[in-house]
Amino acid sequence: MFVAVFSSPEGIVLQQLTDDGAVDGARQDVALESLAASVADLERQHPRWVWDDTARWYPPLLAAGVRVQRCVDLRLSHAILRNSSLTSGSALATAPLSSWDRGALERIERPAEHTLFDWDEAEEHDAEEDTLAEFSDQRAAIIGADDPARIGLLLAAESAGALVAAEMMHAGLPWREDIHNAILESHLGARPAPGQRPALLEAMLQRLRTELEAPSLNPDSPSELLKALAVAGLMVTSTRSWELKKLTHPAIEPLLEYKKMSRLLTANGWHWLDTNVRNGRFHPEYVPGGVVTGRWASTGGGGALQLPKQIRGAVVADPGWKFVVADASQLEPRILAALSGDRGMAEAGSAGDLYAGIVASGAVETRDEAKVAMLGAMYGATSGEGGRLMPRLARAYPRAIGLVEEAARAGERGEVVTTRLGRSSPPPGTAWRATQADAYGDTATEADASRARGQARSWGRFTRNFIVQGTAAEWALCWMANLRRALHDGAGDSWLTESPHLVFFMHDEVVVHTPADRVAVVEAAIRTAAEDAGRLLFGALPVTFPLTVAIVDDYGAAK
């Protein structure tokens, strides 16, 4: 059962639809103030809600105390169907660009406060025609796809992810402002007056200036810093930490420490605390599908996908509650093993530590070499240690390495590649194609050919990693969707925040906030959800996706 939700000049419309997108049943017009009650009433029939954007419709429902189990996010689904090689011949994929192709930028720019009252008249006027027609076009694209089951699973997981993101933002991550402030004071000094640096940061700056004999140096200016380093005889081309660490000079240690302290102040200092934490909660704003590979992005200035270890101690469970923190070990290499069906690599990871298994197979001598070699395979290393080890990895695991090499060659030819469930990479742009064409013209020079080869290799590195990172993102979506359903089913009549619920996600890691007496149930649900995600994507292939699970009072104690 599908129920479309869209606005009309009179209010909100709920329209039942058939599986192929046709209108089925009477139209129900409801006043805006009655929407939550109407949705709650229909939710008892377990429909799949069809709406243009989960980030628009679901937060107000949550605020009104209403949860839904399933939905179709038309905008997220449109982006996948428009670009997937599985649906490239559909009417949707070949149609002219429309408002549905506005992409993630709108979602990124949408302010934190969500409301049903702020749509412009044009959107309201076209909402019925657009929503119903778009759903019909999407159902036709799925039915006519090269593999309807694959693309259907991807769209269901993507839409479920949008529900998860909205629920995590609503629930919020427990946050102790007093502990955060104490962490900042221990690293930076007391909170300074506006426009001033904290005392410890200022002291580190003075030490750096002394070592470089530059009393007015502003190390936050890359050009000033490069000039001061050059005067001290340190010739570097950038101020990145990894390059600075290669140098030997008394100024390097205070410079690296200053950069670390400054990064903490800028990214998660007092301004961040004042802006992003309210009533003891940080409400992360995720953008599902915000990265071209399907990974999530974040917006709102909170940096939900990059909470540094320095401040995780401020993430403290409520009294009587715990965090269950789980991350998938070595996810992307295991995804590569499963994608390629390389049983040798699958066997290497069967005992738990895939890198140790690679060493045991005789492919390389040390665990560090195994890790470097795998990173080289997935990201296209041609030189250095990764490049040196690649031939040995290719001999040991020909199917896995052959898969990423094939994806790289496809990218170099300007072709698209597709993940396990059907998300396809974007084709290179017109400038890329023009550079390639110029390299083979009658007037082409060796410089033209060299430029074209470099661009082709770069795009090949992108497509090489796309299939692995994109499929890993699909696994993570299925993992979260399975876990969300299990937590929801076990909650009974309890509200979202009164029972175990997801509060944080970061690529291959989830955090569940749970009453202390439910931790064993939650841990089992997390592990079962991961196993189910593997089976959904890869069937009976013998690839395991082990988890590292920690039960803690504060997030900082998880690792």
Image (spheres, helix red, strand yellow):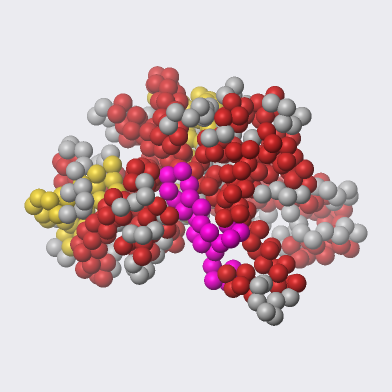
Outermost residue toward the front in this view: 442
Q: Main secondary structure of the magenta part?
A: loop
Left or right of 475? Residue 249 is: right
Nearer to us in this view, 98 or 201: 98
- Image point (34%, 67%), residue name: 95
Quadrant position of the C terminus in the picture: top right
Whole-percent x, y for residue 390 in the image: 71, 42
Whole-percent x, y for residue 252 in the image: 83, 49
- Image point (53%, 35%), residue name: 341
Left or right of 405? Residue 479 is: left
Outermost residue toward the right in this view: 233
- Image point (59%, 38%), residue name: 399
The quadrant where residue 113 appears: bottom left
Quadrant position of the N terminus in the picture: top left
Whole-percent x, y for residue 28 in the image: 11, 53
Nearer to us in this view, 62 or 182: 62
Residue 468 appearing in the image:
yes
Nearer to us in this view, 165 or 114: 165
- Image point (78%, 65%), residue name: 224
Left or right of 453? Residue 341 is: left
365 relative to 68, above or below: above
Residue 57 appearing in the image:
no
Total labels: the figure holds 0
416 relative to 420, above or below: below
42 relative to 500, above or below: below
Left or right of 398? Residue 506 is: left
The quadrant where residue 6 appears: bottom left
Whole-percent x, y for residue 227 in the image: 82, 65
Is residue 425 on the magenta stretch?
yes
Instruction: Find the magenta span and give its range.
Output: 411-432
